[in-house]
Amino acid sequence: MKTVFMGTPDFSVPALDALINAGHEIVAVYCQPPRPAGRGKKDRRSSVQVQAELLGLEVRHPVSLRSAEEHAAFASLKADIAVVVAYGLILPQTFLDAPKLGCLNIHASLLPRWRGAAPVHRAVMAGDTETGVCIMQMDAGLDTGPVLSRSVTPIGHGETMGQLHDRLSGMGGDLVVETLATFGNLNPEPQSDLGVTFAQKIEKTEAKIDWLARSVEIDRKIRGLSPFPGAWTEIDGQRIKLLLSSVVAGDAAAGTVLDDKLTIACGDGAVQLLRLQRAGKTAQSAEQFLNGFPMEIGRQI
């Protein structure tokens, strides 16, 4: 099919590659424009732009899709279909209507659960035992369109958001290719009004660990925000990212260091911190961290 691809971050790249490998003609790639990043605040191209340019594809990165000029430019592509995955801009109705077969979205949850911006983070943080990918026919609502296909995967015990993110990314590419191959024979399934949940964007304030919370909730938050944006706690005035943990037995005042393996008491039970990162440093195991940042048993954090 003549396909417009619309995506921006790492998560989107496997779908672009899968479409090309399946023989679809990518007539244009839309992504977010380069943005200042890093210590030098130099403009950095998105992962999708980098990959599309390597493949010699036309790249467009408008700041907005609202103008008549952008509408006309999109319509002029005369695409059969558009595939959208983590693009970052809401498509106006004129964009949804322009491709012959409409616009498909690759969404990283089992809709209608976790509509919205951060479905992978929220699934891990909520303690879900499974999640997956849906291919949805887009409409004007927020992830409300009928579902054409879905693929389910368990969330492993101890799995981080980053690990799940990478698996779902590959699943999305495979599933959209399968969906396009049988597109004419699929019956779109309207989403149920039951079981709707919303995956709100992760706010900076919620990434701070409250040691009064239950150990299972703290562990889910640490894994659900790892590696980005990263759950954190403050120790001796320094913000320390917590990237991996496990729930263990322990009983003391919340925030107490219980042993020389970085086991921290919570409001109920304890968590052992397994991987941490100091500001400006690389991620370290607990043992490596303690070599440069000793934590005496019994202290509060």
Image: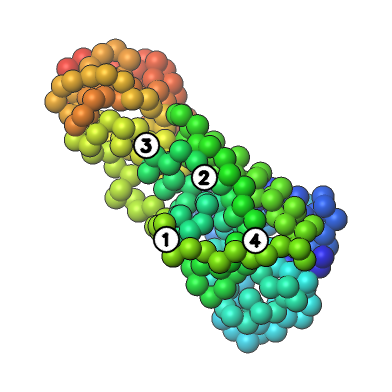
Q: Is residue 300 toward the left or the right of residue 295 in the image?
A: left
Q: Position of residue 154 (x, y in %)?
A: 53, 37
Q: Secondary structure at mark 4?
A: strand
Contact, mark 1 vs mark 2 (Cβ under 8 Å): no
- Residue on which disc 4 sits: 148
Contact, mark 4 vs mark 1 (Cβ under 8 Å): no
- Residue on which disc 1 sits: 194
Q: Amino acid at mark 3?
A: Arg
Q: Secondary structure at mark 1?
A: loop
Q: Amino acid at mark 1?
A: Leu
Q: Residues within 10 Å of mark 3 (few under 14, many from 20)?
A: many
Number of numbered discs: 4
Q: Earlier in the sequence, mark 4 or mark 2?
A: 2
Residue 220 numbered tag? 3
Contact, mark 4 vs mark 3 (Cβ under 8 Å): no
Contact, mark 1 vs mark 3 (Cβ under 8 Å): no
Residue at (36% x, 39% y) in the render: 221
Q: Amino acid at mark 2?
A: Thr
Q: Position of residue 281 (x, y in %)?
A: 44, 31
Residue at (27% x, 19% y) in the render: 249
Q: Position of residue 104 (x, y in %)?
A: 65, 65
Quarter of the figure with residue 68:
bottom right
